[in-house]
Amino acid sequence: MSDLSDATWDWILMFVKASKAFVEFCTRRNRAEPKPAHGWQRRLHNKARRASKSGAVIIGVEYRLALEQSLPIQLDEYDSVISWVQGDEGRKRGTSLDKVCGGDDSAGGNMTAAASLRRKDNRKKPWMAQLLLYPEKRLHFNTKEAIENSSDNI
């Protein structure tokens, strides 16, 4: 079993100014080469376990919640973090820039898929891969509630 004690891991919590999102990095200490990066939005222990099993740098994007802020703010934040990780900041932290993946479950899976589609539409560098655990891929945005609570035509 992998050692998940805090002594073997670097835990970094950063604020990405461009997106107003917090980002958590989890990576094993003394890494010799750049590692794949993976966006994931779960608790730290789960990030450590995934980093250990995959050999990846795990990044948690803590974007603002829908009840506090309306779309598309969350997508803007998520997209800014992806660009940040795929750029010089990711390189400085040991990520392999051509191996950045995204994933999560439920609403986070939706966010990952939506951010990926948005990046494709805007011709930005895509994820290497996505791991979507039970996302709702057929959300209907033409409901009364969605229309009343939207800050943008999505």
Image (cartoon, rainbow, N blue to C red):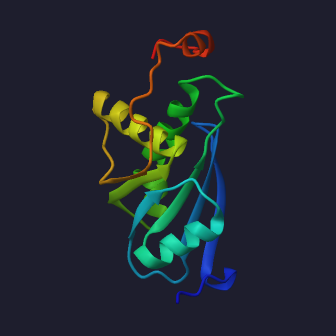
Does residue 8 lie above or below 22 as drawn? below
| Quadrant placement of the C terminus | top left
Does residue 21 lie above or below 133 as drawn? above
Residue 48, x across and y down, in percent: 57, 72
Residue 7, x across and y down, in percent: 67, 85
Side (left or right) of 97 relative to 136: left
Along the line of sight, the residue nearer the viewer: 147 or 63: 147
Along the line of sight, the residue nearer the viewer: 153 or 82: 153
For residue 6, which quarter of the picture? bottom right
For residue 100, which quarter of the picture? bottom left
Residue shown at the point (34%, 34%) measured from the top left: 117
Residue at the extreme right of the image, as rendered:
68
Does residue 120 lie above or below 16 as drawn? above
Residue 21, x across and y down, in percent: 63, 42
For residue 26, which quarter of the picture? bottom right
**Residue 68 visible in the displayed image:** yes
For the image, the number of numbered tags is 0
Residue shown at the point (40%, 51%) measured from the top left: 86
Residue shown at the point (48%, 39%) measured from the top left: 111
